[in-house]
Amino acid sequence: MSRIEIIQNRLSRTGIDLLVLRDQGNIIYAVDSERPVSGLLLIPRSGEAKLLVTPLEGVNMSYSLNGVRVVKLDRGEGYLQRLLREKPAGLKYVEFDALEMHEALRLEKELCVLLKTGSRIVREMRLVKDSREIDKVKRAAEIASQTVSEIASRLSEGTTEVEVASEYDSLIVLKGAFKPAFETIVAFGENASNPHATPSARRLKRGDIVLIDAGSDYLNYKSDLTRTMVFGERLEECEAARIIEAVEESKKAAERKAFPGVKACEIDKSACEVLEEYGLGKYFAHGLGHGVGIDIHEPPSISPSSNEELKAGNIITIEPGVYMPGVGGVRLEDTYLITDSGPLKLTNASFK
Ligand SMILES: [Mn+2]
């Protein structure tokens, strides 16, 4: 059964006449596309699904994409304008995944229907990955892991953060990735204290912390990993050694908890407790992790406020960190497939 057919079954069961998708990740998932696609996807309860695309997007698109009919807008025509022409007959109840309130109110009148936004149907389907999705994340993880290992083994004194980041970005493309999954973070020394550091012209010195947070996008699926090391000195002799050990132990505690049926907040808590024991809890500035798939950040969120239970087939990150303003930071992150026998690590970059 195609994803569109699975969605249509759900629409029948819940009495929805038409589901309209605007979120790019939802569209890519529903169409099952290995290329980037955007537009407006109309999935009626029965019959043909239609993807409305702009004339620009549509230049090289054929009449159909995995069984979904591609409809090119006229020049200057808007998606919602065209929706009025393309809608199936007899609509009573329509759901959107995302729509501005003012647009929803206007469309409800123009379509003479009951309209709801914030549909979770496709988001929920995306939580549990199928084997083809898992294979793509695995490949995205391999590309990123190999590349981080390679560039880490070639680091040299005086190189800049920007140079290392751009080397990573170009190497992954040569290995078959579309692009980085997000703006690659390379942070030396004190810059590592910013969890979202932007690579700068800062040069690498002996004894610096080196933090690399990098991902790749392979056929629309992402991976995410972070490694932290000390450049040019034996780790045991560095002040950062104890912090790296604490973050490693915190990550292991979360891994031991990451089984199906466990609440995401419990996993976050187990990691935090270890950092607390080391007296470093107050330096942990973000949630423990997030789902990864078509989007780099997608449900389930692994944070203190997340009551979602893990399921087999979830793909998540675990990424505890310690950030000391002006001094430095340590973050260790991997991407995992949750299985009935626990978390399976998909990223495996090593600095050895
Ligand atoms: Mn991450």
Image (cartoon, grey):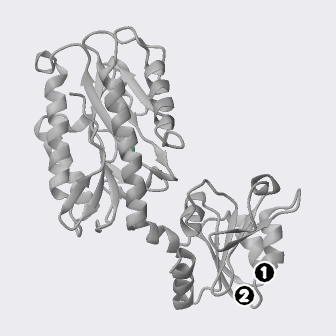
Q: Of the residues tagged 2 and 1, which is closer to the observer?
A: 2
Residue 148 or residue 270, whichever sits in front: 148
Residues packed near mark 1 inside 10 Å, few (<14), some (14 to 19) or many (20 plus)? some
Residue 163 position (above or below residue 263): above
Is label 2 within 8 A of ligand 1 (CB to nearest ligand atom)? no
Q: Is residue 292 visible?
A: no
Residue sitting at x 21%, y 68%: 340
Label at residue 111: 1
Residue sitting at x 49%, y 56%: 294
Residue sitting at x 35%, y 44%: 142
User: What kind of element bears circle 2?
Assistant: loop
For this orientation, the residue located farthest to the right is 75
Q: Is residue 260 visible?
A: yes
Residue 145 or residue 182, whichever sits in front: 145
Q: Earlier in the sequence, mark 2 or mark 1?
A: 2
Label at residue 91: 2
Relative image position of residue 230 (x, y in whole percent): 24, 20
Residue sitting at x 34%, y 36%: 146
Is label 1 within 8 A of ligand 1 (CB to nearest ligand atom)? no
Residue 264 position (above or below residue 108): above
Relative image position of residue 127 (x, y in whole percent): 40, 66
Q: Are marks 2 and 1 in contact (CB under 8 Å)?
A: yes
- Is 244 positioned to the left or the right of 293 in the image? left
Q: Say which amino acid is labelled 2.
A: Leu
- The quadrant where ligand 1 appears is top left
Relative image position of residue 25 (x, y in whole percent): 55, 59
